[in-house]
Amino acid sequence: MNYQEIQDALRKIAETSALLEEAYIENGGEVTEVTENYEEYKASLMGLLAGEGVDSLGRWLKSKEDEKATYQAEKEAADRRIKSVERTIDFIKQEIGHILRVTGKDVAKGAFYTFKATDATKTGINGELLANRYGDIAEKALREAGIPPYVGFKLGATVKAVEGWSAGHDGEGSDLLVRETHLSATFLKPRKKNEEKE
């Protein structure tokens, strides 16, 4: 039983119910051969839906849940691979930056690739300091507002928000920022033929 057949059965049940009600009204509520036929037809449709219809929808639902699980697993695997590749890219750039510093060069030109020594800076939030500074205050405010203890919370801040606030408030909050600097390199790829003409 496919989806269209299920919809047809539902429509027929609705139509039969209306005809059955009309027949009972015309006969003063008495059971007749016509009402019995309608009742039997309606019951058979309902049995079909409750059996084959439910199984059909169940198979469809299961296939979609399996499809979603597959996509989710693929996405998670892809995310892991992307992170792994990003770490490898950072490592290669650090190695090239190290080579450039050791050789005393700012720029290295190979036959196909050129690299320029740089420092890469990554800025993040000191989560431990954030929690120590504002955790108890936030907890107290929540409980005083009537939010029950079973409702948890997690403090968070973004680098952009802290930098924006700090700039307008005499550096307040800037100690929450953690900056890590390491050797890196700018990667200049070979120019494509059409780029050389420009």
Image (spheres, rainbow, N blue to C red):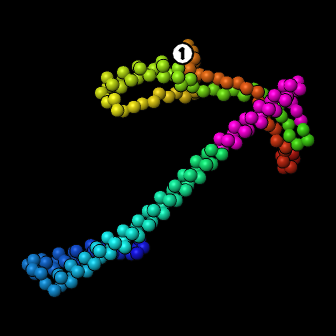
In the rendered image, the vertical position of residue 74 relative to residue 191, given as above or below: below
Q: Quadrant of the N terminus?
A: bottom left
Q: Secondary structure at mark 1?
A: loop
Q: Is residue 184 left or right of residue 128?
A: right
- In this view of the protein, can residue 197 be seen by the observer? yes
Give the image quarter of residue 54: bottom left
Residue 24 in which image quadrant: bottom left
Left or right of residue 47, residue 97 in this image: right
Q: Which residue is mark 1?
A: 172
Q: Where does the image place residue 65, in percent across and percent down from the top left? A: 47, 58
* Identity of the residue drawn at 89% across and 35% down: 109
Q: Relative to residue 112, is residue 139 drawn left or right?
A: left
Q: Amino acid at mark 1?
A: Glu
Q: Above or below — where is 140 with respect to 39?
A: above
* Vertical comparison of 131 with 29: above or below: above
Seen at 17% across and 77% down, the residue is 22
Residue 28 in the image: x percent, y percent?
8, 78
In the picture, measured across the screen, residue 1 lies left or right of residue 168, that is left
Residue at image x 48%, y 19%? 132
Residue 32 vs 4, above or below: the answer is below
Magenta stretch mostly in which secondary structure?
A: helix
Is there any visible trace of residue 106 in the rendered image?
no
User: Could you say which quadrant of the image residue 136 lies in?
Assistant: top left
Q: Position of residue 56 (x, y in %)?
A: 41, 70
Q: Give whichever of 173, 71 is nearer the camera.
A: 71
* Image point (39%, 69%), residue name: 55
* Residue 25: in magenta span: no
| Crowd around label 1: few <14 · some 14–19 · many ≥20 (10 Å) | few
Residue interval drawn in magenta: 82-109
Q: Position of residue 45 (x, y in %)?
A: 29, 76
- For the C terminus, the image quarter is top right
